[in-house]
Image (cartoon, rainbow, N blue to C red):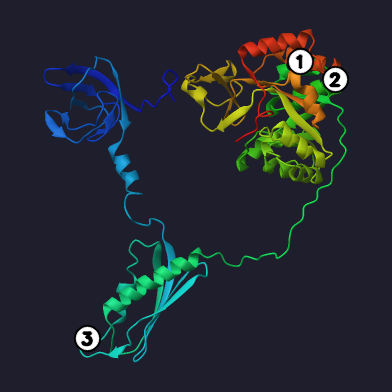
Amino acid sequence: MNSEIPNNQGLYIGKVLDCNKKTKRLKMILENTLKKGDGINLGGGTIGRIIKNGEITTIGYKGDLIELDFVGEAKRGQVVFKTSDSELIDRVQATFKQDKELIKNDVDAKISIKLGENPVLTISDTKGNSAKVVGDKIVEKAMKVALSKEKIETQLQKMGNTPYLLRNLEIDLDDNISLPISILNQMRRDCIEALDEERVKIKNRSYKNKVVKYNPTKVRRDNKESLSVKVKNLEQLRETLECGIETIYYEDVRTLDEAIVMSHKYNTKLVYSTPRIIRYKEYSQLNKAKESGINSVQVGSWGPIDYFKDKELNIDYYLNAFNSETVNYFKEVGANTLCLSQELNIYEIKETLKYTDMDIEGVVYGYTPLMITEYCPMGVVVRDCKKDKRVAKCKESTYALKDFKDEKYRVSQDIFCRSTIYNSKVTCMLDNLEELNEIGINILRLDFTLEDGEMVRKVIQAYQEVLNNDYKLGLKATKLYNELDDRGVCAGHYYRGVE
């Protein structure tokens, strides 16, 4: 990734030493391999001949002083990138341009050739599929040269461009008999075609000959609203505690012990929020949360549900609860609260919540995550990053990706150095809280990502003001909304859903 130019630049191969317009030659010292047919960012087209030590060659290596035939403009010191690799392109094209199956399946064959009978060929794969064909010609006694097992094996092994590879062959052959090779070849082709058709069929599928009826039960919900907050660090946590929030989700496992001590002073429920993605070997880093005195955990993937099975569970929106059946399932497995999928609109939410009495969260403030990636965009700028979060420079500044409209998409990292890219506009539902409460969302959640302590306090106090003022915007809420509106706000998918 280039921090200055958004499009692909290619692989750096050196700088221009000289460009002679009379001889139409470009001179450079290579910093990487360059071959005939490769593309570069100067002049367009591909590399023709490469001249090294006065001799024409097809490849130049790192450290070589070379000349290239070049028509166009180039300045001394201009950076040269390799934009395409001829060898790589040829290798990739070979995988789809050739009419050839690259993945082979083992098959076993059995052939019976008996005097006075039609030959029979059976081919079976490793999944229990089998095909059988009978030859058109009756086997006769040999007049001159008898058919041998070696010849039969040679013909039946010719699987060509089919997705099969002959593993075992059983031959039942009478002595001194004759059968045209063309018959063997035709039997092989017909049997392979029949096996193809057999493998397409779906077997062992059971069917239920009855109508499935679905009659969910409507429930009466308690619409008494409350605020919950999700924070990433101690500074955000401190401001949240001082604002009197009763339930706080905390993401940083490295400072979890300190966060627990802080929350106890305020008699506040602290819930550890697990990373969105956790690979098998990474669970060891969550032992601190498992062995801490914390009793409640928020999970956004299936693995932590089992890992923290002795804790009270809270379901985050990453598990994409999209209907009442999903919501009620999580309730049955012991979940305390559930945050609905952010892809639902208010009409879908209203219909879903008719059939569940579980405590439901909805995100009413925050920058929605758009993408999570193993790639580290900050690494382009911070070249000496050693992935030690205690000293990582990516914690010292706010980083963002900027698109062609100058929209900025902020980036943060979790404890495993996975980058999350957030929406450029913040979701703000300050003037729509009453509607959300009426459709059944009884816990209004504020998600903080890269906000400083002052901004955290302003947002919480604005939402508290609206709830305490019968859903009307007071001075704090109006001031905050105007401030956010100048930067760009949205209503998430509440009023448009997803297509």
Q: Residues within 10 Å of mark 2 (few under 14, many from 20)?
A: few
Q: Is residue 308 left or right of residue 192?
A: right
Q: Residues within 10 Å of mark 1 (few under 14, many from 20)?
A: some
Dot 3: element: loop
Q: Are marks 2 and 3 in contact (CB under 8 Å)?
A: no
Q: Is residue 50 left or right of residue 441?
A: left
Look at mark 2 in the image and give the residue it sits on. Answer: 266
Image disc number at residue 145:
3
Q: Residue at x 67, y 14 (%)?
A: 452
What amino acid type should be assigned to the residue bearing mark 1? Glu
> Image quadrant for the N terminus?
top left
**First reached walking from the N terminus: tag 2 or tag 3:** 3
Look at mark 1 in the image and give the residue it sits on. Answer: 239
What amino acid type should be assigned to the residue bearing mark 3? Val
**First reached walking from the N terminus: tag 1 or tag 2:** 1
**First reached walking from the N terminus: tag 1 or tag 3:** 3
Q: CA distance from mark 1 to mark 2?
A: 12 Å
How far across and how far down the image is residue 447, in percent?
Answer: 70, 24
What amino acid type should be assigned to the residue bearing mark 2? Tyr
User: Residue 487 versus residue 59: which sits nearer the camera?
Assistant: 487
Q: Quadrant of residue 78?
A: top left
